[in-house]
Amino acid sequence: MRTKKNESRDEEVPHKPAVAYSSEDKAKRNIEAKLDALSYILDLCVESQENAKKVFEAVEKDDGDAILLPKSQRQFLIWSDISLLKSLGYQGEGFRRTGNGTLNRYTTLHSQVEELTSNLWKELQTQRERRAESTESQLRKALKRERMRTATLERDIIELRRQLQNESEERIAAQEKLKEFGRQYGHIILREGKKESAKVLSLEKAGRGDGKR
């Protein structure tokens, strides 16, 4: 049985107007839209290093006041710029600033903000380190290829010099042999040459004599 005291207490309980519930619902959807956007970027970064590089470079190059990607809960609350999201092909709805008190009313969403923000930046840092390692590995491989190419060229040059040296030595040796041959047999060749010349002259004279007859 309800007493007058209880009835009086029920009458004192304030009831929120419908517009208040509507505002709370919009505030909650606004937080959820931001979380959806963070999840989208995280998935892209996990998907490929190129996506992570694009996100990281966009954030590092930005020197404006707007927050392109929140790093903390405070930045998450004031985050409203979706230019980075659009450049990444995001099709979700936009969002606006969020009050700290609004986020505190939703414990689950509050913890998701901390978790997603932390995971996203850890992934970006991980991908950046992997990219640096990959670049370093590529440089090491390029340096190794260059050293191998240089070593091959050096071997070719050494071999070419050896061949030239051999040819030079062979040419000198041949010249020495010719000189030695000339010293040993030059007088014979000269003598025989004179004999042959005498024979030719004799034949020529004989030919002329026959022609006069």
Image: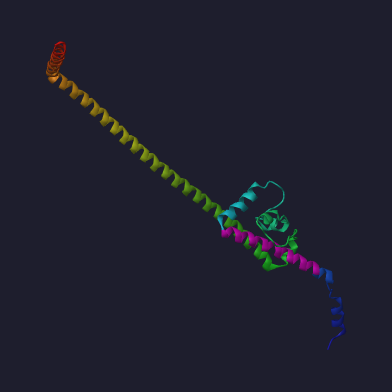
14 or 157, which lies in front? 157
Residue 25 on the magenta segment: yes
How many numbered marks are there? 0
Residue 110 on the magenta segment: no
Q: What is the quadrant of residue 190 in the picture?
A: top left
Magenta part, dominant SS? helix
Image quadrant where one finds the C terminus = top left
Image quadrant where one finds the N terminus = bottom right
154 or 13, which lies in front? 154
- Image x and y of residue 145, in percent: 42, 44
- Image x and y of residue 90, in percent: 67, 59
- Image x and y of residue 52, in percent: 59, 55
Q: Is residue 48 above or below residue 149?
A: below
Coloration mode: rainbow
Residue drawn 80% across the image and 69% down it? 22
Q: Is residue 191 left or right of residue 161?
A: left
User: Which stretch is magenta?
Assistant: 22-47
- Image x and y of residue 127, in percent: 55, 55
Q: Is residue 204 left or right of residue 162?
A: left
Q: What is the quadrant of residue 160 in the picture?
A: top left
Residue drawn 75% across the image and 63% down it? 101
75 or 105, which lies in front? 75
109 or 105, which lies in front? 109
Residue drawn 34% across the image and 37% down it? 156
Residue lying at the far front in this picture: please name it. Answer: 213
